[in-house]
Image (cartoon, rainbow, N blue to C red):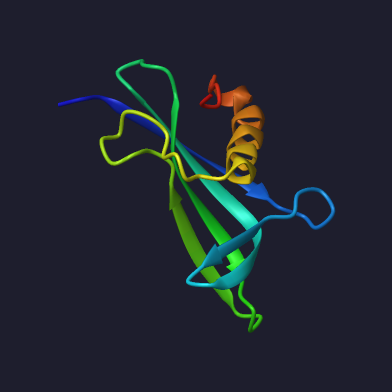
Amino acid sequence: MQDETLVSVSIDLRPGTLTLTLTQNGKDFAAYHALVQFASASGDPWTAQEVKFSAKGPDGKAVALTVDLLNDTWDGPRPEVSAAIWKVVGLAATSAGDVGITYALPV
């Protein structure tokens, strides 16, 4: 059994600070909140696993969207994740430094 530590970091995406539009099935969603999940197994470096976004759809209704950050084998980043989403992950990692997360964005 592997010992894994999980930390979720919440970020409000305020208009004018970071604008993030997510597209799913041809519809655009304006994200206003992100919850980034980081994990560290047995003292290994921290890895960002997923981001859960709260967003408003074109009809103004709130929706939840989840972006998996790791590839299907869980050994590296998913190549199709946009730079804007990685920026959100970076902001979360920076704000979580107080709880001991050290994290480097994938190159």
Towards the viewer: 15 or 23 = 23
Q: Residue at x 55, y 21 (%)?
A: 104
Q: Residue at x 65, y 47 (%)?
A: 11
| Image x and y of residue 46, in percent | 44, 24
Q: Residue at x 61, y 70 (%)?
A: 28
Q: Work out whether 6 lies above or below 46.
A: below
In the image, farthest residue toward the left: 1
Number of marks present in the image shown: 0
Q: Work out whether 90 lies above or below 62.
A: above
Q: Work out whether 28 lies above or below 71.
A: below
In the image, farthest residue toward the bottom: 59
Q: Quadrant of residue 56?
A: bottom right
Drawn side of residue 91 relative to residue 35, left or right: right
Drawn side of residue 51 relative to residue 58, left or right: left
| Image x and y of residue 24, in percent | 50, 67
In the image, farthest residue toward the right: 16
* Position of the N terminus by quadrant: top left
| Image x and y of residue 81, in percent | 50, 44
Drawn side of residue 75 relative to residue 7, left or right: left
